[in-house]
Amino acid sequence: MRRSTSLLSAAFLVWVAGLSGAIPAGIASRVAQTPPPSSASAWLDENTPNWNQPGAAIPAAPQPEGGSNLEYCERTFRQATLPEDALVESAGWTLTGAVQIFNDTTIITGMANADGMCRPLSYQVFVFSKGAFVGTISPNVMDSRTDGSVFSVDLYQPDELSARFNRYEPEDALCCASGESRVFYEIQTEGDAVVLVPELPAATFSSPDAQ
């Protein structure tokens, strides 16, 4: 109840401040607006070289721009229960969403921030094999409801997975991307190391159920 009251109070202050044309910086960070569609999706349409390298460390979480909204979204966090969870958290990420496990493969999602509706911002999906980090599904962090943001990951074989990414047209509402791109990945062994390898360019098509 305390969190709901705080958010309602923040919304009221924003409405009042809007009448005077000024929004206090502290309040604005609490009711962060969903970012507009971005152009960080070009990698999906190209034969992009693999950004994952054998033996690479888990990338560190970026610092939130304009302040963090995570303290208001604690109910959306997932508590660490696996060794892989601890590795992701140690790199500065907040766990979100469900973990997926198939034999020796584990998939975990981490976010660095959240918007006013607690949707993940600056989030990434991490893949592990036998407890070792083998790569991310995107070369860059993603924001919910933007072009190139992942909305579904399917671990359908012990060493194979696919991911579906939102693709927005300029006229699309942020709620509803009119297309999606699908990428297939394989966990491959290269010498003594294991790495996640994407098949690019992605397959892109219209999809009314993209979220």
Image (cartoon, rainbow, N blue to C red):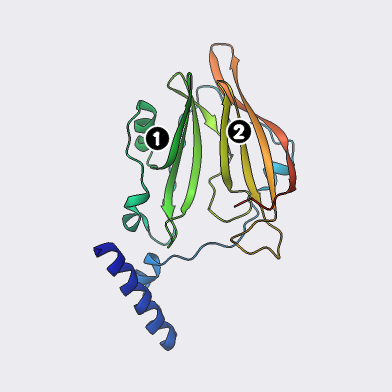
Identity of the amino acid at label 2? Trp
Q: Position of residue 210 (x, y in %)?
A: 63, 50
Quadrant in which the N terminus is drawn: bottom left
Q: Position of residue 63 (x, y in %)?
A: 41, 51
Q: Which mark is residue 154?
A: none
Q: Nearer the viewer, mark 2 or mark 1?
A: 1
Query: Residue at coordinates 57% horizontally, 21% vertically from top-left?
Result: 159
Task: For marks 2 and 1, give the CA distance.
Answer: 18 Å
Q: Position of residue 183 (x, y in %)?
A: 67, 36
Q: Residue beneath label 1, please?
A: 88
Q: Position of residue 111 (x, y in %)?
A: 44, 46
Query: Residue at coordinates 45% horizontally, 59% vertically from top-left?
Result: 115
Foreground residue, 117 or 190?
A: 117
Query: Residue at coordinates 48% horizontally, 19% vertically from top-left?
Result: 103
Residue 205 in view of the camera: yes
> Reading the chain from its start, which is encountered first: label 2 or label 1?
2
Q: Is residue 160 above or below residue 180?
A: above
Residue 60 in view of the camera: no
Query: Residue at coordinates 48% horizontally, 46% vertically from top-left?
Result: 123
